[in-house]
Amino acid sequence: MLSLAAFLMTLLGGLVADRVKKRRHLVLGAAAGVMLGVVAFDLLPESLAGSPPDVHGVPLPMLAFAAAFLGIHIVERAMGMHTAHEGDYAAHHHARTGVGLTAGSALVVHSLLDGAAIGAAFQTDASLAVAVAIGVIAHDFTDGFNTYTVTSLYGNARRRALTLLTLDALAPVAGATLTSLIAIPHVVLSAYLGLFSGFLLYLATSDILPEAHTSSRRPLPTLAATVSGTLFMWVVIGLSD
């Protein structure tokens, strides 16, 4: 059911991508806050529970966290997935449809990891799975939003954008199903939660928040939405413990 909610939220994000105009910055700001709350209040503490092994004096989950953050940054820089915003330039035409398809496909892989995180969390604790799912569901709205937007941004037809959006929506269901069928050792699970934390935090800081503030000339409402999203996750995680 939780992965199905992620499926529906991803679709919803994509379908409203071309309809949300003036208030898009509030949605993106709140989603970034939720992602920060999941990482800080739940994923990282859970990954460090049970005394995971150290590697050269650093807990394994924290090494995985840093590796995921830096790895995604390096990949995005190498692939040129973060170009300047359209509003920064005069009117022009994108002919690099492959860039949009590559970026959209990368978001589909990320959604697969989202679903896997839900399945992996269920192997630890049901309340953890609910908290992770809330973060995933909140993030998947922006994931679907961005998948549709970035695919169409580089000149791809609407049919291609909708195809990638559909794959992006199905990916969490597939990831949760596969992970729930496979028993994961605690050491591997803690490292995975660290990796997922790095991935979520990178998306929040590198993708979601910059886009939220670029979309609006009034930063205070966006900042309030981000803080509200973080506080919301604090309340949710506190109630689930």
Image (spheres, helix red, strand yellow):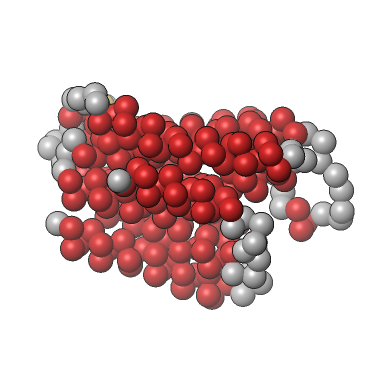
Identify the residue at image location x=21%, y=39%.
Answer: 122
Tell me: 59 left or right of 84: left
Q: What percent of the width, then of the height, locates residue 14?
A: 57, 50
Q: Is residue 162 visible?
A: yes
Q: Is residue 125 above or below residue 205?
A: above
Please identify the quadrant where the C terminus is shown: bottom left
Depth check, front residue: 231 or 118: 118
State the image quarter where residue 53 is shown: top left
Is 200 situated left or right of 107 in this image?
left
Image spot of residue 198 (x, y percent) = 40, 41
Residue at position x 61%, y 36% in the image: 163
The location of residue 106, given as percent across then percent down, is 55, 33
What is the count of numbered marks?
0
| x 25%, y 62%: residue | 236
Using the rendered image of the protein, determine whether residue 57 is visible from the camera's viewpoint. no
Q: Residue at x 52, y 60 (%)?
A: 28
Q: In terms of depth relative to the viewer, which is nearer, 127 or 221?
A: 127
